[in-house]
């Protein structure tokens, strides 16, 4: 069993991005610029955005943080998005989710110029990904592809089972793993809460991507020998052991499943560290206009 | 075994659309207007477009046919699309594919205003379908959903195997059948030319949607008793029996598979007749502004 180390891979990619930014600047090119819009003071969102801003600094990007209070109107937020769409210095931007109930997240997502949509949530990017065209792939799926690639995991013709059908992980992972590409070219099965044959499917899987949001859902008796397991779960369970008072728990019962795996991602330290670095990579792509002109 | 009769269902829907158009006109509403752009004189394209125009007349739509010779430039075609985008009388329009090699089909598709994209090929419509938002669903997948619905075929929790991963059938069918909806809520598996476990998957399937483009690919020993089979194949094989000199052949070896089925679509007369009527329904939606304003 080999552990897929998201910390090591994300540090590698971070160094690669930083080096590329250094070369761009040395050649007199434009510094990639990521803007983040944060509404309110949700603890999780604060942490994520702070971490994104910090990583921007570490790789040499310019970053801007635009804050609104919880009571910002939808119209004000849409006007901000319009300014960012037009701001020629901003290469890409994100609006941190979730948003307060009185604002339509979908309307906000669709207001973002898809050429600056480094989160990859705009329907144009989702649609282009499905068709197999160049696009911004959202952070978690892009991070998972990168892990498979860096560990040179064979995917062609394999049976990949995706647990969960969320718009941000399950569905895009399914679309990506079935493309005529590497990683990809898999027979792909998507299972979810309504699936009647989930265990049988998992038992026949060569690769399992667990993104069902139920802690320790995937048990040892649900996988075959040699399986590759990617654990996307990040449920916070109370813990008396950790200083924070909680423990990040994946969708995989690690002690049971890992002995049967050829490769497995731990939680934490697997998929998690890849997400922010995937956003940085999308920002670099946006800065270089390598996806859209 | 019950035959799913696409001719009967499409005739029903045609009558429903014609009745709705009659009511709209009687109430002084606008007649839905479909425009079709046809480049060159490909035999298949001529037939399809003629059939679309004829069906428009039958349901009471206004239709326009815009013809270009094979040597039309991409710029001319894009200018035509721009005019149709702006023409307030045109509710929806299609550009008949395939296009000559010197014209980028993808550029043409993306130039169409997605609110008039009744073919459902624009990435925004593809993306919105994936996310589960209202959109124009392309004709063949929409027709298949309608057949499942009209025959009240149970789908929730069932294992649906999609054979083929084309952008116009396989991928959208997979996305639709996994949605939290009816028809939908299936465990979905997508198999294709690279799949190593295709037969095993088909044997475990409750529903098989065959869109792999290989005549009589699905054999009797690949399906279980009680399976629902939707045959999307339409390969023209030479025939000495028919007047036209060819025989439309599906992806299913009908004589072997049908005795094991609870439901099956024949070829011809199954999915085929549903496609034009699905385009008509999208045009009605466009005319009524029931998807986009």
Image: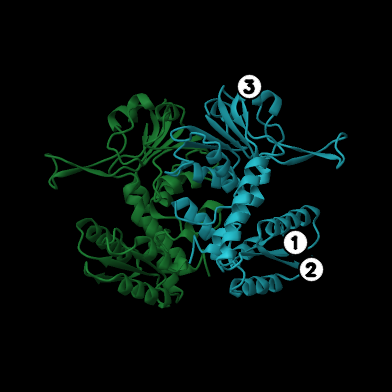
Chain colours: A cyan, B green
Subunit under mark 1: A
What's the residue at 57%, 48% (across, down)?
Answer: A142
- As helix, strand or loop, the secondary structure at mark 2 comes to loop
Q: Earlier in the sequence, mark 3 or mark 1?
A: 1
Q: Confirm or deny contact between disc 2 and disc 1 (CB under 8 A).
A: yes
On the image, the x and y values in percent for residue A200 come to: 55, 26
Q: Which residue is mark 2?
A: A71
User: Residue A100 has which mark?
Assistant: 1
2 or 3: tag closer to the N-terminus: 2
Disc 1 element: loop
Label 1 near label 3: C-beta < 8 Å? no
> In the rendered view, does B147 fall on the left or right side of A122?
left
Q: CA distance from mark 2 to mark 1?
A: 8 Å
Measure how far apart labels 3 and 1 are at the Cα level.
41 Å
Q: Residues within 10 Å of mark 1 (few under 14, many from 20)?
A: some
What kind of element bears circle 3?
A: helix
Q: Which residue is label 3 attached to?
A: A221
């Amino acid at each position: 069993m080999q552990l897929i180390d998201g910390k090591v891979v994300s540090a590698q990619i971070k160094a690669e991005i930083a080096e590329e930014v250094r070369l761009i600047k040395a050649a007199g090119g434009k510094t990639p610029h990521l803007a983040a819009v944060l509404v309110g003071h949700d603890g999780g969102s604060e942490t994520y955005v702070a971490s994104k801003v910090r990583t921007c600094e570490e790789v040499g990007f310019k970053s801007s943080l635009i804050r609104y209070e919880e009571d910002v109107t939808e119209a004000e937020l849409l006007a901000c998005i319009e300014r960012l769409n037009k701001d020629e210095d901003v290469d890409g931007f994100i609006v941190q989710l979730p948003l307060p109930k009185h604002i339509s997240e979908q309307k906000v997502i669709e207001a973002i110029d898809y050429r600056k949509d480094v989160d990859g949530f705009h329907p144009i990017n989702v649609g282009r990904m499905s068709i197999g065209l160049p696009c911004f792939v959202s952070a978690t799926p892009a991070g998972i592809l990168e892990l498979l690639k860096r560990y040179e995991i064979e995917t062609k013709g394999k049976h990949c089972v995706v647990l969960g059908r969320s718009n941000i992980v399950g569905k895009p992972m399914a679309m990506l793993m079935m493309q005529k590409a590497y990683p990809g070219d898999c027979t792909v099965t998507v299972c979810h809460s309504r699936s009647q044959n989930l265990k049988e499917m998992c038992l026949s899987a060569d690769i399992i991507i667990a993104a069902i949001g139920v802690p320790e859902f995937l048990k040892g008796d649900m996988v075959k020998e040699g399986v590759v397991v990617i654990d996307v779960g990040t449920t916070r369970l109370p813990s008396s052991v950790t200083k924070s008072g909680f423990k990040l728990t994946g969708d995989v019962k690690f002690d049971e499943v890992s002995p049967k795996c050829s490769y497995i991602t731990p939680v934490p330290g697997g998929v998690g560290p890849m997400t922010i670095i995937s956003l940085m990579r999308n920002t670099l792509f946006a800065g270089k206009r390598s996806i859209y002109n």
